[in-house]
Image (tube, grey):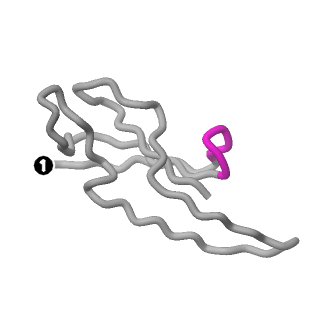
Amino acid sequence: MQLYVHETYAPVSTPVKRLRGFERVTLGPGETKTVTFTLTPEDLQLLDLDLHWEVVPGDFEIMVGRSSQDIPLQGTLKVTE
């Protein structure tokens, strides 16, 4: 499983999907497993125009899937000051 983050509005250009977590999962037929990811402020930081790392308040798209092309789970995380 892979966890991607994208800030919907940022004062600087950011990647469409930034990989912020992954876990290799092997499943047998009919088997399921729960995978948990923890996002920290460091996972949401970006390098600003003054070359300082900061978390800019706003909406972050959170995407989880088998690959960057196969994202069945999506949600929004709102960061406030």
Task: Specify whether 63 is left or right of 46.
Answer: right
- Element under disc 1: loop
Q: Is 29 drawn above or below residue 22 in the view shown?
A: below
For the stretch drawn in magenta, what is the main secondary structure?
Answer: loop
Q: Residues within 10 Å of mark 1 (few under 14, many from 20)?
A: few
Residue 57 on the magenta span:
no
In front: 40, or 73? 40
Q: Which residues are magenta?
A: 66-71
Q: Position of residue 45 (x, y in %)?
A: 26, 45
Q: Residue at x 27, y 54 (%)?
A: 42
Q: Is 32 drawn above or below residue 45 in the view shown?
A: below
Q: Which residue is mark 1?
A: 81
Q: Position of residue 7 (x, y in %)?
A: 35, 37
Q: Is 11 drawn above or below residue 72 in the view shown?
A: above
For the view shown, which residue lies furthest in the right direction? 29
Q: Residue at x 79, y 75 (%)?
A: 31
Q: Residue at x 75, y 69 (%)?
A: 26
Task: Specify whether 53 is left or right of 40.
Answer: left
User: Split into 4 quadrants, where in the image is the N terminus?
Assistant: bottom right
Q: Quadrant of residue 23?
A: bottom right
Q: Amino acid at mark 1?
A: Glu
